[in-house]
């Protein structure tokens, strides 16, 4: 267990479904992140939250909707996804967003869109 | 963000040291050098980071060239559990600094 917990570990959803991914950390970190890792591609940063405020949206389609109710929890709401959205979705946290701080990653949610 | 260059893959024998190189010729004076690794079916894991001086921790050592244009991650005794993709990443010290991943080096460890 890394300190960042993601649920569920695996998710299969249809293109018309609505589902949510959950991320939780109790490390006292103030910044949280969503990354996407598609097969054979580098990790792509999707969203950055710092002290519950979204500070970056890396041109992510609106069918992905993040929510950060507090510094310990981060959600990714999914609706009307496409098969190409199938990927490993990783959550991470860090003390702050500055370059001196390392990230702690969760184990990810393996999403399959059918 | 400044770019890093790493070999696509490397092989090592178990219980031998491994030196993973990273070139970053366009590094700026305020860029930290971070190393992460990703084991199969897991999220990336922080390994080590440094600015100018060599760094050691329980996982690895980081050797930084005097001109900072290259660095080497050193695993002192590779085990099968060290087989992973290793990423060398430059991060500015600014408050909006991001962790941007490249393709990394896939390390294979054999008996």
Image: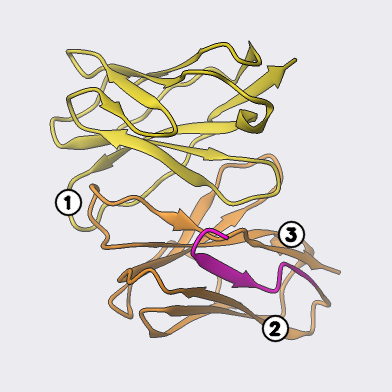
Residue corresponding to mark 1: B94
Label 2 vs 3, first from the N-terminus: 2
Q: Which residue is mark 3?
A: A84
Task: Give the drawing colour for chain B.
Answer: yellow
Q: Chain of mark 2?
A: A
Q: Hey, which quadrant is residue A76 in on the image?
A: bottom right
Where A43 falls versus B36 (above or below)? below
Q: Position of residue B13 (x, y in %)?
A: 66, 11
Label 1 crowding class (10 Å Cα cut-off): few <14, some 14-19, many 20+?
A: few
Residue at 28% of width from left, 52% of height from top?
A101
Marks 1 and 3 share the same chain: no
Circle nearer the viewer, 2 or 3: 2
Closer to the camera, A32 or A55?
A: A32
Where is mark 2, residue-wise?
A19
Q: Going 66% across and 16% down the picture, which residue do you hit?
A: B14
Q: Which residues are magenta?
A: A1-11
Colour chain A appears in? orange
Pick out the residue farthest to the left: B29
- Helix, strand or loop at label 1? It is loop
Q: Is residue A110 left or right of residue A97?
A: right
């Amino acid at each position: 267990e890394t300190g960042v917990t993601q649920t569920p570990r695996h998710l299969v959803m249809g293109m018309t479904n609505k589902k949510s991914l959950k991320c939780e950390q109790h490390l006292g970190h103030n910044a949280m992140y969503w990354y996407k890792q598609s097969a054979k591609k580098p990790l792509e940063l999707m969203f950055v939250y710092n002290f519950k405020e979204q500070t970056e949206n890396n041109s992510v389609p609106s069918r992905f909707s993040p929510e950060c109710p507090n510094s310990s929890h981060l959600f990714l709401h999914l609706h009307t996804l496409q098969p190409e959205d199938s990927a490993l979705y990783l959550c991470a946290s860090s003390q702050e967003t500055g370059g001196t701080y390392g990230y702690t990653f969760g184990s990810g949610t393996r999403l399959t869109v059918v | 963000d400044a770019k890093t260059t790493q070999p696509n893959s490397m092989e090592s024998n178990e219980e031998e040291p491994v030196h993973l190189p990273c070139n970053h010729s366009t590094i700026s004076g305020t860029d930290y050098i971070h190393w992460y690794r990703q084991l199969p079916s897991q999220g990336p894991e922080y390994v080590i980071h440094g600015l100018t001086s060599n760094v050691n921790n329980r996982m690895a050592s980081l050797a930084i060239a005097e001109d900072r244009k290259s660095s080497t991650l050193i695993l002192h005794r590779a085990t099968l559990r060290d087989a992973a993709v290793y990423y060398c990443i430059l991060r500015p010290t600014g408050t909006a600094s991001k962790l941007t991943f490249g393709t990394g080096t896939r390390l294979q460890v054999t008996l």
